Amino acid sequence: MAGKNFKARYDCVIVGGGISGLTAAYHLRKRRLDVLVLERAERVGGVIRSESQNGFLIDYGPNSTLETSPEIADFVREIGLADDRIYGNDSANRRYVLRDRELRALPMSPPAFLKSNLFSFRAKLRLLREPFIRPAPPDKEETISEFVERRLGREFLDYAINPFVAGVYAGDPGRLSVRSAVRKVYQLEEKYGSLIKGQFKGAKERKKAGRTEKTRARLFSFRKGMSQLTEAIENRLDQSILTNADVRKVGRQDDGVFSVEFRRDSQEIAIFSRSLIITTPTYISQSLLQNFDPEATTALQGINYAPVAVVFLGFAKEPDCRPLDGFGFLVPEVERRKILGCIWSSTIFAGRAPLSGAALTVFVGGMRQPALAALPEPDLQALVLDELGDLMGLHSSPDFVGFRKWEKAIPQYELGHQGRIEQVEKMEWRYPGLFIGGNFRGGVSVGDCILRGGELASNVEKTLIERRAVPQGVED
């Protein structure tokens, strides 16, 4: 779907039709502002992509998100998807981590941790030291690996945090900044001096603010997959979206109005806007913003993206393998396997496979083994089946196999990321009305992007109101 009629001047133009840009556009339309979303691809949604094939429902991008905030639930209701939202089955709360070629349950409570065979007695004993370990100096930036090993020990890093980072970022904890990538964990040490103390004391604050801890937040998707979310927003934006719109250049005039030049249907088109939001991936954003601030664009260039190959396996009948009794499993780097993990999609949500069948989604590559993400499809299929045969005892042949390769899937919040964000903030300050968003900033999950999209809209409205109050000719 794409709008056909558009004007020459808008209150806000948004470059990028992913979940961040769509959410911002929705909130701006609610405020009765003239908005236009420009998306280079034929469809909006970015990496959110759901497809129905051969009786299976496949999410080739994010498969779900967490209801960590009332604003997320309110947004789902506002766009008319409350009745189509489905929560993860109770069994999806059971998650596994590979250790010594065995899938072991990840403990989700203190009693379960004490009984768990995922961690040795020595690792459990080491955890008792955590409240007495001094915080790092305020000016020291640590990687996740450095932070976790210092506070919790090597084994906890290897078998809890390393697979977690692979599942969220497809990243390397030895490169990711703890301050940027897991900021809430970093703030526990900063505020309380201890992760364990902060976990208990911070629970009261989260409850008061109406926020839910991610380990307790409800997992949800939609009956037709995650694309139902972006499609619902698209339908409410009506003629405010132009797809196949390749933005070539953005600029700012002396009067503070932004110009946007794009190509569509072999035509070169120029439009103008009082504000501008850019939510494209940073490797695209930096090329558009070169004339604004060289330091900021250099900072954006420094953000790497993890490559990920998604391999979907569909079985018309229950496959011959270990019980699919949970969310799936993650693979620590120390286990030296060729996959990052496997989601048991049909166990988590209904409607992902025929009633008597099953659906598995496997992830390959990431920052850990980027070359594997680029393998030809036959090689990827053979690799995945070999790994699942060894780890899950899978001996059945799939009735359907689907592939999606994301060359640049997830932005990496590596060391120095906060400095890069500060450069972007300086650029926004220098050019009132310019806002840079996307999943490189404020979190990579769908829920994070929904919240950030709402913030972008509020910031745009605030800036437009302030600029109306400035007499013409004074602003610059």
Image (cartoon, rainbow, N blue to C red):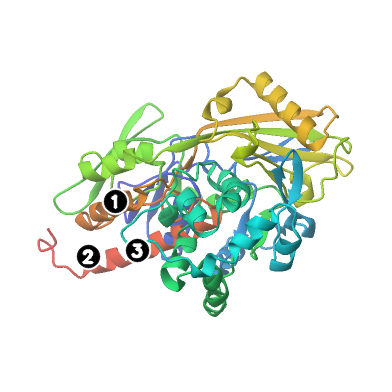
Q: Which residue is mark 1?
A: 424
List x then y, in percent, for residue 109: 70, 66
SS state under label 2 = helix
- Give the residue displayed 17% in from the left and 68% down from the top: 470
Of 471 and 318, which appears nearest the observer? Answer: 318
- Give the residue displayed 43% in from the left and 36% down from the top: 40
Q: Amino acid at mark 2?
A: Arg
Which label lies toward us, 1 or 3? 1
SS state under label 3 = helix
Res. 57 visible in picture? yes
List x then y, in percent, for residue 189: 45, 66
Q: CA distance from mark 1 to mark 3?
A: 15 Å
Of 322 and 28, which appears nearest the observer? Answer: 322
Residue 71, above or below 44 = below
Tell me where residue 281 sits by quadrant: top left
Q: Is residue 307 left or right of residue 424?
A: right
Q: Which residue is mark 3?
A: 459
Q: Pick whichever of labels 1 and 3 is earlier in the sequence.
A: 1
Residue 398, above or below 135 = above
Q: Amino acid at mark 3?
A: Asn
- Give the residue displayed 41% in from the left and 60% down from the top: 28
Q: Amino acid at mark 1?
A: Val
Q: Pick whichever of labels 3 and 2 is earlier in the sequence.
A: 3
Res. 54 visible in picture? no
List x then y, in percent, for residue 388: 76, 33
Crowding around mark 3 (Cα neighbors within 10 Å: few <14, some 14 to 19, many 20+) is some
SS state under label 1 = helix
Crowding around mark 1 (Cα neighbors within 10 Å: few <14, some 14 to 19, many 20+) is many
Q: Which residue is mark 2?
A: 467
Q: CA distance from mark 3 to mark 2?
A: 12 Å
Q: Pick whichever of labels 2 and 1 is earlier in the sequence.
A: 1
Are the residues tagged 3 and 2 within 8 Å (C-beta)?
A: no
